[in-house]
Amino acid sequence: MKTDNPEPNEARLRDLLRSARPAPPLPPRFQEGVWRRIENAEATAEAPTSLAWLDRLVERLLRPRFALAGITALLMVSGVAGVLSGTDTAKQAAQARYLSAVAPNTVR
Amino acid sequence: MRRSLLILFAVVVASAALAFAAYRLAGHLCATHLAHSTDDLGWLRMEFRLGDAEMARIRDLHQGYLPKCQEFCDLIAAKKREVAAILGTETNLTTTVEQKLSEVASLRAQCQAAMLRHFVEVSRVMPPEQGKRYLAEMQRLTLGSHEQIEHRMSGDAPPAHGHH
């Protein structure tokens, strides 16, 4: 059955239900506790994201394409440095050889 | 996160080991390859980028200089043996010892003069800039050690281990 003004009835119904099942009083500092729990939950959820870049970096490093490029670059740079160092060593040895031929230690 | 850290650590360690191994291997191979030459004049070709014609001319000069150098070395060695023999029998520094020491010094000076003449001759075979560099380098390498000692003795250079 349709009524012309349902709102007063609904309000009365709510009051009736509330009085039939009374809510227990909230414990002391209930609201503060709720907020604390919310903050803790948020902090726990945020913690892993602060180092998420590390996970992303490792994930990227382990991709075959990146790994291969990294190893190749590393080998090339190290190899070039080794060649430069080896050339220098060989030059010093050759210089010592020439010096010992033309200028023995007795006259130096 | 802990797993990522461990993986990153392993990657860094493995990369360092790989880089070190590649560096040492390349250096060793290069040094072995370049030092394989038994030529006494290999350094000149390598350092001053000389051509075959220049090297041939320098080789002639070198072959001509070696007997002179050997002769001086023998004379100096003989004179030093004389000094050692006299010092072995006498306890005082006699005029004979002083005389022998002067002779050693004189022979050394003659040898150094011959050596410098040879360096000048060799430098003239090279292109002017390289020749200049060669001469400066040889003077530094052969006479430089004496100059350093003299500077230290005269106090021109700061003492390496404080004031004595």
Image: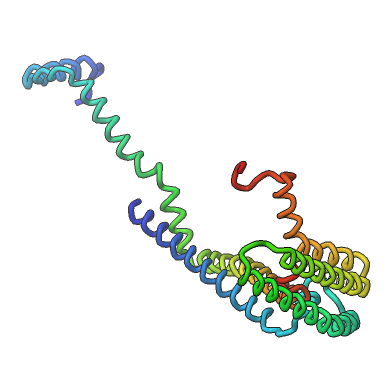
Q: Where does the C terminus of chain B fall, quadrant-wise?
A: top right
What's the residue at 60%, 43% (across, down)? B162
Viewer-closest of A28 and B121: B121
Percent x, y of residue B72: 80, 77
Q: In this view, does A7 lie to the left or right of B56?
A: left
Give x and y (percent) for residue A64.
49, 68
Which quadrant holds residue B93?
bottom right
**Is residue A96 visible to the viewer in this orientation of the structure?**
no
Question: Compared with residue A21, is residue B8 higher up or lower down, i.e. above or below?
Answer: below
In the image, taking residue B8 as reference, residue B90 lies left or right, namely right
Is residue B45 left or right of A7 when viewed as pictured? Answer: right
Rendered position, B125 above or below B98: below
**B105 or B26: nearer the viewer:** B105
A28 shown above or below B60: above
| Residue A81 location, quadrant | bottom right
What residue is drawn where x is 70% and y is 63%? Answer: B94
Task: Specify the quadrant of the image occupied by residue A44.
Answer: top left
Q: Is B24 displayed left or right of A104 in the figure?
A: left
Instruction: Identify the residue at horizontal 56%, vertical 75% (top origin).
Output: B25
Is residue A58 visible in the rendered image? The answer is yes
* Residue A17 on image: x %, y %: 11, 21
Query: Total label count?
Result: 0
Identify the residue shown where x is 80% and y is 75%.
B44
Q: Identify which residue, B17 or A5, lies in the foreground.
A: B17
Q: What is the basis of the colouring in this image?
A: rainbow
Q: Is residue A66 above or below residue B68?
A: above
Q: Position of residue A74 (x, y in %)?
A: 56, 65
